[in-house]
Amino acid sequence: MADVRMINLTIEGRPVTVPDGTTILEAAKTAGILVPHYCYHPGLPVAGVCRMCLVEVEKMPKLAPSCATNVGEGQVVHVYSEKALEARKGVLELLLINHPLDCPICDQAGECELQDYTFQEGRTDSRYREPKRFDPMEDFGGDVLYVTNRCILCTRCVRFMDDVHQEPVLCVAERGDRATIGKAPDADLTQPWAANVIDLCPVGALVSKDFLNKARAWELDRTASVCTGCSQGCNNVLESRDNVIVRMKPRSNEDVNHFYLCDAGRLDYRWMNRPDRVEVPKIRMHDVLSPVDWETAYDEAAKLLKGKRAFVVASPSLSNEALFLLKRVITQTGGEGVFRCETGFEAPLPGVPDLALRADRAPNVYGAELLGFQRHDINPLAGLKQGDVLVLAGETLPGLDLSATTRASAIIVIGTVHVDGIPTPSVVLPIANVAEEEGTFTNLRGRVQRFLQAKAAPGYVRPSWYAFADLATAVGANSDDMNLPSVIFSALAQSEPAFAGLSYDTIGLRGGLIAGATAGAH
Amino acid sequence: MSHGPSAPPRAPGGAPGHHEPYVAVFTDGSARQTELRDIISRYPDKRAALLPALWMVQQDRGWISEDAMREVGDQLGCTAAYVKGVVTFYTMYHQHPVGKHFIQVCTTSPCLCAGADDVVKAFLEHTGCKELGLTSPDGKYSVIEVECLGACGFATPVQINEDCVENVTPAKVPEILAGLRD
């Protein structure tokens, strides 16, 4: 890479050194100063239409839009000078002329940049006494509702659809004070990645139909997680209220999903709240499943597995930690581990390299493969031998021919829900789902990424790594020291060459690549 | 309903959408296609012919429907959304069907002083249009107010399609309407 010239400048009295070609707005960020802005977004082409990011640059005759002005050697930039503040206050006053100020009923309230900057720099009252413009709302299709009155015409949505999604269905229609965002005839935002315009919209003009009037932004608890919709492993934020996940938003990670999350992923969270869960461990007594305590259930499982081969069908939605401990059970019993993965169409986001809704619709397919689980999508039960103990770990085998399950001497179900269509299992162990525990997934490019616990698990449910560690101990592979996900991951990194050198500390929240992982296809 | 005097005229009943099937303007071998190609050849970018192409559609079909936006977009290699942005930007492109005779009465200050208000009323009355911007039930007339037509010395000027009539008074309105060809 050629040497990039470094530019020195002063922003608000702070010395800043950034590569040539950086904008003043981005340079200010490195100095810890966020210049107010609407139309600028780091993932989109620069438009320079909102005029909110005006700053004063010494020796320049006029205020400069910092999103569209590159840094220059020796520049002295004032973000909060009287002149700059005055100009931005004027911009805000104009933006608010036709804004309905319906914050009390607006979903964006609390996470609205118009609110934030007005609070920061705007006028305390309006001088506008004339009637405001009124336009009806428009359903833009997909998950997107356009509330015309709130729009400030920053055109982020138009540029996203044009340049990133490359399905140009939005435009600026009309002009002057009548301008709105227009939708192409016969096309709408029913597109695989279109709902990202909701996150891009700095105000409440584009809102989610799914989240409409559901919760106030400030009532939500936010937890860093990883989307379980496919093997891409997009970073997301689970937003919960009163222990219920109510929304999923993208979490930016330049190495995976940039700023985006596909529609399928973001709307696939309701299952995390499903009420029909197994909440207590159960064992079969007189052909009926009866609740017991955990220790009794482990003992029963260990008794069944004694001298038998464990045939494990694991879900590729289990964490690396859970699969690692499950592998101990398999090794100890001389058994076999398989998994299956739902597949679907692949939907790339054209403007971002190597980002797509992947065909494999599970988050940890690569991790399961690395840990020695064999993939059998069509008939995962083919290898089940007469007399084996069938262990269904987080897997419910929907829509498959389950007649082979009769070959098993016993069935142990470890999961969040009961499994239909199989003989009554001997043991049922309830485990937490992805929102209720901590762990890591390995995405299809070999990036190991952490997800954190967003809500409490119901009943006597235990995290999957907890249940598998105890089960491994019960069958004789002592895992008593496996008492935290971070500890389990360190053990995993030590015994699995692919994961060598990784730890929770090193992967952080942006993820870490496994040994031998390349940016390309594996 | 409208934002101002130059809001786009709407069909009677205000229900755009139920129209006859769209007939393409720039069909293969048509004179319009030749004309469009000639215009395109003058510019480095096909899209430069967008405004003339839209005028051709409006002359031939009376207004610019969503189907027309798609056709023009296809002809000029841009998206229907882009064409929509342009059509809606310019107020002189009709986004709804209008009467065969599109009557624009100047109501800027000098004409208003000269009684343009009464001229507007006379046109509404004699054409059968219920209000400004609506088309008469027989589909023949639409009346709107416009800003300065640049003929203040001959107030009140009225532009009917491409033609301008000057010194219009309410008394002359029936005569003017009678003189329009069907």
Image (cartoon, coloured by chain):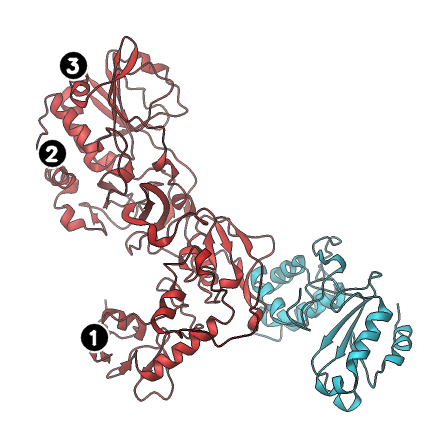
Q: Which residue is mark 2?
A: A482
Image check: B110 left or right of A449? right
Q: Of label 3 and label 1, which has the lower sequence position?
A: 1
Indicate which label's residue lies in the foreground, 3 or 1: 3
In the rendered image of this protein, does residue B123 appear above or below residue A397? Answer: below
Q: Earlier in the sequence, mark 3 or mark 2?
A: 3
Compared across the picture, whether A376 is left or right of A90 comes to: left
Give the drawing colour for chain A: red
Three-letter residue code for mark 1: Thr
| Picture disc at residue A17 | 1
Q: Position of residue A33 (x, y in %)?
A: 26, 71
C-alpha gap between disc 2 and disc 1 = 46 Å
Q: Dot 3 corresponds to which residue?
A: A303
Q: Are marks 3 and 2 in contact (CB under 8 Å)?
A: no
Whether labels 3 and 2 belong to a single chain: the reply is yes
Do we see residue B45 in this rendering? no
From mark 3 to mark 1, how far is it between C-alphas? Answer: 66 Å
Q: Residues within 10 Å of mark 3 (few under 14, many from 20)?
A: few
